[in-house]
Image: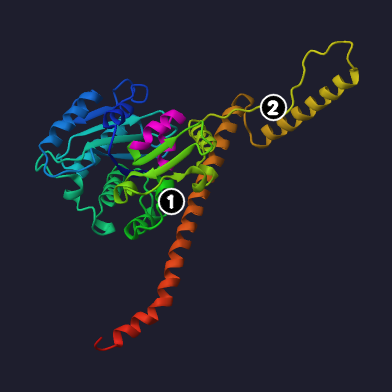
């Protein structure tokens, strides 16, 4: 089913363009389409910059980045590119330069679109044109999701029936943003997005800025990893960075490395016991017999498992990697649920305080004069 994400780029725009234009992910550039800019990432960034110079007002956002993902084995890369063009036409209305690229490096086809934050026609910013501070229905990411669903239905592709229950921009996330609550939840969400798009830990550190996350990594320090939302820093310049440990073990350095490896489909297995294949004749024969019996027992168990799940022996490793990756995905969903529970606890505390003080407020309204 098609899903969408939308987030601003406030730094390293050229790097973000270079990332989505990677020839290894775009069939040597065949799955790239641009509007109003060059197909060369560096030149495209310069083209964006020229329009921004003639824009009105000041803004810290350079460009906007959205991702549209499709269900596995549901669409071809070429068709995804056509759908991406159609979505851009409806969403951007030919008023913004954009760089569109379809990626085929994951087990699902997905496309990236980076578009200039300044309108070519009137020089106003995307935030101003879209009036992004209004209600949920009028917010730009909601428009993007609705248009994506509309395009996908017309092309007979699956869509999410209950988008408010997905990992995208849900009502819960919007409501928490509106109230200015739970920076921790917003920060975790942003970090999760970076992890899913990173190739390794170094790549993760580089990409954090593209997702609006400030990161401080010092491997020589006891507290080696800290995070903060760029948005939070803008609102409160005195705000301090949050330790990864404070966010939970799932966001500590080693866990982030493991999660990136899992998304990349990497799984390594280290045997608990090292079995010596060549035994010297002088060693105790009993040990060799015990090892042989242990090997036969393991082989028998493995054979039964393969038969039970109807897996060909040569496909065992791929099946194991797939199952393990799925378990990590479920763990990630569990973590998101736990985060939502934590945020609901914050809202519950505020609600209890409101109920406690409500009676005084109502009594105050009844008083006359001073």
Mark 2, Cα crowd under 10 Å, few <14 / some 14-19 / many 20+, is few
Say which residue appears at 12% left-offset and 40% top-offset: 55
Q: Is residue 19 above or below residue 67?
A: above
Q: Position of residue 213 (x, y in %)?
A: 37, 41
Count of number-bearing discs: 2
Q: Position of residue 200 (x, y in %)?
A: 46, 29
| SS class, disc 1 | helix
Q: Which residue is mark 2?
A: 271
Say which residue appears at 40% left-offset and 77% top-offset: 357
- Extreme top residue here? 281
- State the extent of the magenta-drawn residues as a range: 191-209
Judge whether residue 195 is colored magenta: yes
Q: In the picture, residue 91 is in which quadrant?
A: top left
Judge whether residue 344 is colored magenta: no
Classify residue 263 as left or right of residue 95: right
Q: Nearer the viewer, residue 61 or 226?
A: 226
Q: Position of residue 2 (x, y in %)?
A: 36, 43
Do labels 2 and 1 touch, CB within 8 Å? no
Q: Position of residue 126 (x, y in %)?
A: 19, 45
């Amino acid at each position: 089913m098609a899903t969408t994400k939308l987030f601003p780029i406030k730094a390293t725009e050229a790097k973000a363009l270079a990332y989505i234009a990677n020839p290894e992910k775009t069939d040597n550039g065949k799955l790239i389409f641009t509007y109003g800019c060059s197909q060369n990432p560096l030149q495209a960034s310069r083209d964006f910059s020229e329009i921004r110079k003639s824009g009105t007002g000041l803004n810290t956002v350079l460009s906007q980045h959205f991702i549209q993902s499709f269900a596995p084995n549901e669409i071809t890369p070429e068709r995804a590119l056509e759908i991406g063009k159609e979505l851009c036409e409806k969403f951007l209305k030919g008023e913004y330069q954009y760089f569109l690229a379809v990626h085929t490096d994951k087990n699902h086809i997905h496309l990236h679109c980076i578009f200039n934050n300044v309108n070519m026609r009137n020089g106003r910013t995307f935030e101003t044109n879209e009036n992004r501070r209004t209600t949920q229905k009028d917010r730009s990411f909601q428009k993007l999701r609705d248009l994506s669903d509309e395009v996908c239905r017309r092309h007979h592709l699956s869509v999410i029936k209950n988008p408010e229950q997905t990992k995208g921009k849900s009502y819960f996330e919007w409501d928490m943003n509106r109230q200015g609550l739970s920076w921790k939840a917003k920060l975790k969400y942003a970090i999760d997005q970076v992890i899913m798009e990173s190739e390794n830990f170094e790549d993760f550190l580089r990409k954090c800025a593209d997702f609006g996350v400030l990161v401080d990594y010092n491997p020589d320090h006891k507290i080696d990893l800290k995070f903060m939302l760029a948005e939070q820093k803008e609102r409160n310049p005195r705000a301090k960075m949050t330790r990864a440990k404070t966010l939970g073990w799932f966001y500590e350095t080693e866990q982030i490395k493991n999660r990136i490896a899992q998304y990349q489909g990497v799984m390594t297995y280290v045997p608990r016991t090292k079995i010596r294949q060549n035994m010297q004749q002088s060693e105790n024969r009993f040990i060799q017999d015990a090892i042989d019996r242990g090997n036969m027992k393991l082989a028998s168990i493995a054979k039964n498992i393969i038969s039970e799940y109807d897996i060909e022996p040569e496909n065992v490793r791929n099946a194991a990697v797939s199952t393990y990756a799925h378990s990590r995905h479920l763990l990630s969903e569990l973590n998101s649920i736990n985060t939502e529970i934590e945020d609901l606890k914050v809202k519950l505390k505020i609600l209890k305080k409101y109920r406690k003080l409500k009676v005084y407020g109502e009594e105050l309204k009844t008083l006359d004069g001073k």
